[in-house]
Amino acid sequence: MDLKKLLTSSVTVADGAIGTLLYEAGYDLCFEELNVTKPEEIYAIHQAYIEAGATIIQTNSYAANAQKLKRYGLQESVGAINQASVQLARKAVQDSGKKQVFVLGTVGGIQGFQSEQLDYKESMQALVEQVDLLLQAEVDGLLFETFYDFSEIKQLVIEARKRTQLPIIANVSLGDIGVLKGGIRLSDALTELYEVGADVTGLNCRMGPYHMLRSIEELELPYDIPLACYPNASLPGYRDGRFVYASNTDYFTSMSERFINEGVHLIGGCCGTTPAHIKAIKEAASGRKPVKRKIRLQSLKTETIERFHEQRPSIKDLVEEKQTIIVELDPPKKLHIDPFIEGAKAIRDAGADALTLADNSLASPRIDNQTLAMLLKEEGIRSLVHLTCRDRNLIGLQSHLMGLDLAELNDLLVITGDPSKIGDFPGATSVYDVSSTKLLPLIKQMNEGISFSGKSLGRATNFTTAAAFNPNVKHLDKAVRRLEKKIEAGAHYFLTQPIFDERQFEEVYEATKHLSVPIFVGIMPLTSSRNAEFLHNEVPGISLSDDTRVRMARAGEDKMKAEQEGLAMAKSLADAAATYFNGLYLITPFLRYRLTVELTRYLRTHTTAPLSKERKLQ
């Protein structure tokens, strides 16, 4: 019997995890490299799964693509590692003496929630290269597994089908029960994969049998698509610095029976599963034929997403209509906040439209900006809350965002954040589950009522998101291309780093006038020559002109004279900026709010006329 007929006409047992077995054996680097350096270990795992009853085994090639192997300096070994993975699986089958055991070439997904910016085109090239190598090594079929990004696995199935008529099993990994990342329903995903060329579609990893069964029970497939299911052994535990999984083979037998009753054709195991789990699956599948899927007369209930629209205009709305001033006032490092509140009120009374609150700027702990924003709200002060990716993982970010929305703090500045090592606690870790460019679409998703995992939030959030723009770079065109990517990701407007050269405003305007979103240009009063030199020489993304530094140096050690010189330059910069931009972002130095209060009053009395519509408002 050929493999394609086997997959459609019988309940087939696949193997289980390879990586977690190697992890338990003490290996903790590149598991795929062991095909070459420790082939006997991989061969023994294949043998154990065949003896346990697996009719299908997969090659140890999950991460054997150029992008993932590059992390270990093994990108030049892609061919050798993939070829060895097939040879080892073939040898194990041959030595077992069993004729009806098939070898699938395994390819794992690349795109996910990584903070690193992975080029989609390069990722696809790496995956297709691996498919070609596995086909050249003469596998019996292909197994695509642990794909969180649906577009990635769909495109890979299309590319693979162009290259071969061998069976393709395409498994996605879920963000939550019944849904993929981005809110794509599992039923829709599996149907599309089948239509573009997959012979069997299903799911693997992340979930144990219980949650995976719930997802399969909710499926609505329009025809009898063969299903695959590779659950984890359990939810992972963490003991003595290592991840552990439950040893629950009897439970696997009973759950496998339920998978079969739900129409699953191919059952294997993912993380934490062992030959004992596969033996349990074999007991449940023995003598069974695939069950035709139940016809569901009623479709799943679609939850109506509530949407609330704030009565007041967003900051983006304001700046598109008139000159808008936002002022940054750093949250204090100490619990005595009276000076901060006094400064916030003074800035408001001077005419600022909103106060921006940094999120532990320069990686130094400050009072939580959400708490301060709520206190300021009681005083009638609008806050633009900064949100950094450094201090919270994805769980914390979503939780924090839900809290911000509940508190009706919907104006956000999304930034990646300075690394922890530059702050007060250099031993602290930087999380960076995502970068700002990857967090923006997740917030956009929440504005559609969908959580990071793809599940309904029950109500749409109402965030307006700003992003950072550093124009103080050698190649401004490259910086503008990054802005375009951030707009595509969901940014509604931008705040720049402070600019200290009047001529630069025209340059920035010309480079960005084609963009569809507003820009707030940063202006920061200098306080001393020492302050100027620190900003110019030590703070990333800030560059001062020679003239600015000379003028501040002339003020010498006279504190009052230095502040007046810094304020005079800031007023001149603000006048120049208002010629081109409606959005002005004033940065308060060292909580000396009286400087930005005076600058705000100056702007309100000197530059109040909005730009003409014909000049395409920035």
Image (spheres, rainbow, N blue to C red):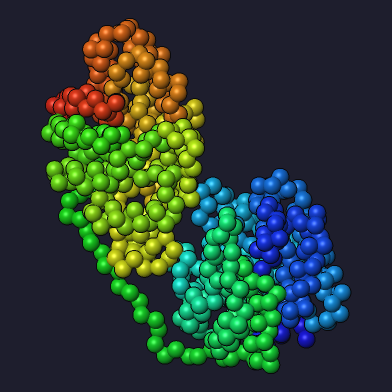
Front-most of residues 571 and 537: 537
The residue at the point 14 percent across, 44 percent down is: 380
The residue at the point 23 percent across, 12 percent down is: 560
- Asked which quadrant contains residue 361, the reply is top left
Q: Could you tell whether 605 is left or right of 60 in the image?
A: left
Q: Residue 344: tell me if it is visible.
A: no
The image shows residue 501 at horizontal and vertical percentages of 36, 21
Marker count (numbered): 0
The image shows residue 264 at horizontal and vertical percentages of 59, 83
The residue at the point 34 percent across, 53 percent down is: 400
Front-most of residues 256 and 451: 256
Q: Quadrant of the N terminus?
A: bottom right
- Asked which quadrant contains residue 309, the reply is bottom left
The image shows residue 74 at horizontal and vertical percentages of 73, 48
Q: Residue furthest front?
A: 240
Q: Quadrant of the C terminus?
A: top left
Q: Could you tell whether 426 is left or right of 579 in the image?
A: right
The image shows residue 396 at horizontal and vertical percentages of 39, 54
Q: Residue 502: tell me if it is visible.
A: yes
The residue at the point 64 percent across, 67 percent down is: 144
- Asked which quadrant contains residue 326, the reply is top left
464 above or below 538? Answer: below
